[in-house]
Structure formats: structure tokens, C-alpha cells
Image: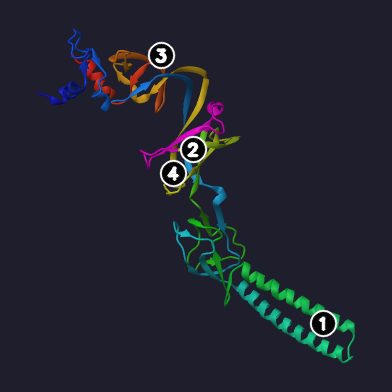
Amino acid sequence: MNWNKFLPCILLTTVLGACSGKGEQTNVEPTALCLTDSLLRIVSVDTVHVQEVIDELTLNGRVTFNENQVAHVYPMFGGTVTELKVEIGDFVRKGEVLAVIRSGEVADYEKQLKEAEQQLLLARRNMDAMQDMYASGMTSDKDVLQAKQELTSAEAEERRIKDVFSIYNFSGNAYYQLKSPVSGFIVEKRISRDMQLRPDQGEELFTISGLSDVWVMADVYESDISKVSEGASVRISTLAYPDKMFAGTIDKVYHLLNSESKTMNVRIKLKNEEYLLKPGMFTNVSVKCKADGTSMPRIDAHALVFEGGKNYVVVVEPDERLQVKEVDVYKQLSKECYIRSGLSEGDRVLNNNVLLVYNALNAD
């Protein structure tokens, strides 16, 4: 005997009962079953409400960096990479050393600094001598003023070169350090140890991005442009996390069409505190958008039973009897559906373990 065939009926025998009064026996058909307290432990009941029809548009999207959190690190001077401190995927903090480079241009600046220090020393000695001579009446105000200007110029030149050392992170002996300008992850790296850098190197060596916030860029076909707008609610799914939905809103619509794909981009900003979303991931973006102002009864998609090419629901009648009722579905979304006919405002339907009850009501 196939017990699986009779299991739903055996289970429902304990929770479904014929409608009757308090202990009184009435003649009802075997399939006239009622909603009992026992049944309410395994099912749930929803009240039908007429609401404006919301359409759902599915778009293809991809996770990208939040461009406001991306920093590109370029070499300041040519030279040879002597140390490489990080790899792709590493998290770095602002000011952390990424690489050390030895450069002839840095050596020139070090030479300039020594010369500036010597000039400053001479200017101070000259100033001291002029002041002593001026006190003895051996020189004029003009000579003292000129010595003071030379001292001021020497101080300014030394300060300028020291500022260059600070800005470009010179570390002595012709070395300079590339430091991270922001905190984030190393997402691109175009540098290796012993690599020779040209003075006119135009490509960035590191790209650093924070991933606490990411963007999802979705493509909208020309025929669907009128259906999307800023502020529309979206649900985002990924292959990596099929059971997890990310909720957000469209915060920017790019009002330009790609000449090749004939699609328009929309952007969704998402919090990514656990770093689940990785730039480059493909996504499905479900956008909720208003239809044409039509209002219809709306029910949970779990309330539907599809059989034989038709849709059914289990309705709870005012006297608590359970009845299978055919409905005409106007539009079915991932979590809800709109009913063209078969239900009205205020009707009550089961929306959990519906198939179990449906099979029991249709059992011969």
C-alpha cells in the first residue's frame, strides 16, 4: 500500500472535522470540512483586500564599486619597486604603506634639500654678522635688510623642499613610499617587486575601494523605461545567495541609452556591512512599478494551488466551512498575485499548507 498517498488525509483527520454544533451530529457531506482550532496550528488565514495593481519588472544587474569610495594610487616618480606590502583583496587603512620605490628623482630632491640647508646656514651666519656690524656702525640699514631677505628666501626654500618630502612620503636614501589615501580593499594591482616605473607612468598602480556600500547597476530596455523611476522599491537576488534577498530603492536613473545595447542604466545603493556582495556579481533586480491604476483583490502567492491548467484557493466561509474555489489570476508576482475574478474584498483564504487542505477537500 502507498502510504504517501493517504498521509495527507490521515493527518487532516486529526485537525479537520465536519461542521457541527456543540456535540450534535448533523448530516453533511464528507468533504464539507471546517476550520478548527487544531487546523489553525498548521495553517494561516489572510483577509483579501482590494489594492492598486503593482507590476514587477525584472532587470539584469551587476554589482559595482561605489565610485565615491574608490581611490586610485599613481606613482609620483619613476624608479624601481623594492618592497611590495599588499596583495589584491587585502584590507588597508588610510596611511598604510603599499609599496616602497627607489628613485633617482628622489635622490635629486635629497640633494636639493642638503643644498637648501647649507644656504640657510650661510644666510643665518650672514645675518648674524650684519647685525653685529650694524651695531658697531660698520654697515647700513640697506645691508641688514638685504641679509634679512636672503635669510627669508633660504628658509622658504628649505620649507618648500621639506613639504615635498612630506607630500610624497620620502623616506631617505632615495626611497619614497606609496601610502593608501583611504581605508578599503585592494581591488586592482598593477605593480610587482623589482618592477621598473617610468617617470611618465600613466596607469594607476593600485585601486582601493571601500565595500561597506556598493552600487547595483541594472539595465532597462527601451520598452520598459516608462515603468521605472527614482524611489521605486527593488528586491535583488544573486546566484551566490539564492535564499537571500537584498532590498533597496532606485536612487538614480541615467537618462541616456547605450548605443549598442539600447538599454538605460539605473542605480541602486546597498549597504554591504558583511561584504556579501562582491563587485562583478550578476544580479536579478525586481522593480515594483505601478500599472495603469487598476485595483483588484490581492493575495499571497502561497495561497494559490495550480492544477489542471487552473488556479484555486481554499476559502473560509462565514460559518468556518472550507471550500475550494477557482480564481482567475490577472498577474502573479514572486510574492503576491492579483485576482481578476473569484474573490472579493473581505474574503478569507488559507495561505499556508494550502495544498494539504486542498487535497483533503478533493479526496474521494
Tell us which disc is closer to us: 1 or 2: 2
Q: Which mark is residue 147?
A: 1
Query: Residue 309: image x %, image y %?
Result: 32, 16
Which sits earlier in the primary sequence, circle 2 or circle 4?
2
Q: Which residues are magenta?
A: 220-246
Q: Which residue is mark 3?
A: 344
**Quick one: label 2 or label 3, which is nearer the N terminus?**
2
Task: Pick whichever of labels 4 and 1 is earlier in the sequence.
Answer: 1
Q: Which residue is mark 2?
A: 248
Q: Secondary structure at mark 3?
A: loop
Image disc number at residue 281: 4
Circle 4: element type: loop
Which residue is at 21% across, 19% downward?
Answer: 16
Cβ–Cβ under 8 Å for marks 2 and 4: no
Badge nearest the viewer, 2 or 4: 2
Checking the image for residue 348, the label placed there is: none
